Every structure is written in C-alpha cells, then in structure tokens.
Amino acid sequence: MIFQDKYEHWLMRYFHLVFFVLISLGANTMDKPIAIVLHGGAGWFANLSDDQQSAIKDKMKEAMDAGYSILASGGASSDAVIASITILEDSPLFNAGKGSVFTSEATQEMDASIMRGDDHAAGAVASVSVVKNPIKLAKHIMENTPHVMFAGEGAEALAKSGGLEIVDPDYFYSQEKFEALQRAQSKQHLKEDKLGTVGAVALDKFGNITAGTSTGGMTNKLPGRVGDSPIIGAGTWADNESCGVSATGHGEFFIRYNVSKEICDRVKYLGKSIRDASDQLISELKAIEADGGVIVLNKKGEAAMSFNTPAMARAYKGPDQELVEIYR
C-alpha cells in the first residue's frame, strides 16, 4: 500500500511536470511574432494608370494574405513564401512566371531561389522555359536533392520527374512585353522601364525565417544570362539570427556586392538595424548607378523596404500592421 501511494504520488508529479512543459512550450510558441513582406519589383513605373496601380496592389494584397493565412494557422514560413510567390508568378502583372519578359531571341528564361534561415538549406533554379512556377522547383530542389542549384534542361527534367507543372512556352507569351522587347532592341540597350522581379520573406511562429525570389530576368538580355535572383547571398538570403532578404534590381551589381547576405551580415556583426543596413547598402548601390531595392524581415517580425528607384511594389503584414504600396 505504501509503495502504491508513493508510486501514485510520483506519477502525479510526473504528469504535472509534463503538463507544465507542454503549456510552457505552447505559450512560447504563441508569443512568437509572425509576419510576411513581399515585393513586386523596384523600378520607374513611370506610366502606370490608376487601374494598373489598383491591379498591382490588389494582386500584392492577395499574395500577402495567402502567405499570412498560412503563418496564422501555424504553417511554416517556407510554405507561406511559396504560396505568396506562386500567386505573383501566375499573374502577368510582374516579371516572373507568366509575366516574364523576353530575351533578345524572344524567349523566356526564368530564375528563382528559396532559403531557410534555421539550417541555411537552399534551392535555386536558372534559365528554365517550361516550368510554370520556378519557385516551386527551387523548393523541390531544396527539399528533395543534395544540391542547391539546377539550370536549363537539367532543371526542367528534374521538374518533370518531380511532378511539377510543365507548360508550353506559349503560356508565357505577352504582346505587351514583346513590344517592350522591340522597343529595347530599337534603342539598343538592356535597361527596362519597369523591374518586376517578385519576392517574399516570412517569419513563422517557430521563429524560422524563409526568403524567396523569382524573376524573368531582363528585357533583351542575352540568352543564358543569369541575374542575382537565383544566387544565394545575392538575390536571396535567410538567417534566423539576423534577417531574411529578397532583392530586386540590376542583378549584375547585386551579384558583385552579394547584397542580400551583406545586409544580414551588417545586422549580425555590426549591430545595425535592418532599416539602417538596407538603406545604407541601397544608397551605396545608387552611388554606382545600380538601381534596385530589397525587402528585409528580422526575427521580431520587423520589416524594412529600401529602394533607390521612384517606386517598388511592396506589401507587409504583421500582427498589428498592414500596408500595400507602390510609390514612395
């Protein structure tokens, strides 16, 4: 009897301890912030009508809400990023997926990347022409292969074997962007009036940051050219201890200066705020005539959206704030 009483006493204490731990873990998880920030490209956006502005803002909000709803239901930041970017890739309003611009040979070549901040796992894809959603292929690479980047035919073969949606190249055709190619070729320059690369950075309730970026590249670019969007550290970076970044702009410069990782390094090692670090670096790029912008998110759910062009389509949603903007 005495043994049974002691046994029941210690069993009860054990259950109380387990209950306390579970409650504590649940409380800690619930207390953690969630947030998502998106961009739809930094550029000039000089001739946008009111209807065009409304359409871009509506699509940005749709993508933002889709990602945030995943976070709010306890989902992973990587899933939120995929959901948001997929919506933007499926829209002709941006330079990614369906809206991708033309190369000098009137074809599309798309790039994308994704990175997790907890273990620095990453996936990237470059120069694909028949993958409907390059960002999904980047995630497939991250989760199902020992590699980081695939390009061209090898990437497309991986997409097919992985069951990702493959489309005819005509799916990406846009008369508006074909005419933009013709204008660019008549002027013999590569710079476009609008830079519509898309990206998202999300923070989930587990404290994990994920960043992703997707693009159709540059109007009139030479076939095979790859910009910063699929380059880990240049167009995309995520680290739970500092921040996550997705970049948009003149990719060659973002590659040379390793922009996304550089911002997080200044936060991590120099103690700068994400706003100061991103503003400083984007200003340095402006000094060398490199256009572009970044979205940044830290582990507190705070966001920075820095750009040196007249506009950057951007959106942010956290527990107590929401915004969708294009111009300054």
Image (spheres, rainbow, N blue to C red):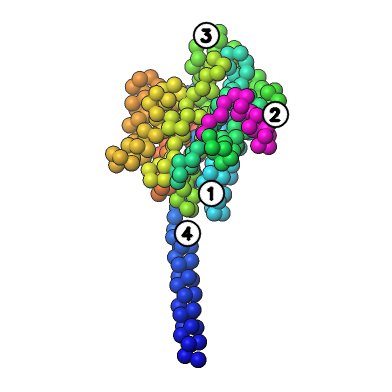
Q: Which residue is mark 3?
A: 187
Q: Amino acid at mark 1?
A: Ala
Q: Amino acid at mark 2?
A: Val
Q: Which residue is mark 2?
A: 167
Task: State the residue at coordinates (43%, 32%).
Answer: 233
Of labels 1 and 4, earlier in sequence is 4
Mark 3 lies on a secondary structure that is helix
Instruction: Estimate how packed mark 2 is, as few (under 14), some (14 to 19) or many (20 or more) residues with alpha carbons within 10 Å.
Output: few
Instruction: Estimate how packed mark 1 is, as few (under 14), some (14 to 19) or many (20 or more) residues with alpha carbons within 10 Å.
Output: many
Q: Which residue is mark 1?
A: 76
Distance, label 4 to label 3, CA atoms, is 56 Å
Q: Mark 2 and mark 4 in contact (Cβ < 8 Å)?
A: no
Q: Amino acid at mark 4?
A: Met
Distance, label 1 to label 4, CA atoms, is 14 Å
Q: Amino acid at mark 3?
A: Lys
Mark 1 lies on a secondary structure that is loop
Q: Which residues are magenta?
A: 148-166
Point out the frontmost of discs 4 and 3. Answer: 4
Please say if 96 is above or below 269.
above
Of labels 1 and 3, earlier in sequence is 1
Q: Mark 3 and mark 4 in contact (Cβ < 8 Å)?
A: no
Distance, label 2 to label 1, CA atoms, is 28 Å
Of labels 2 and 1, earlier in sequence is 1
Task: State the residue at coordinates (61%, 21%).
Answer: 108
Q: Position of residue 75 (x, y in %)?
A: 55, 51
Distance, label 1 to label 3, CA atoms, is 46 Å
Q: Position of residue 156 (x, y in %)?
A: 64, 28
Please say if 174 is above or below 81.
above
Residue farthest toward the front in the current orientation of the protein: 3
Of labels 4 and 2, earlier in sequence is 4
Residue 154 colored in magenta in the image = yes
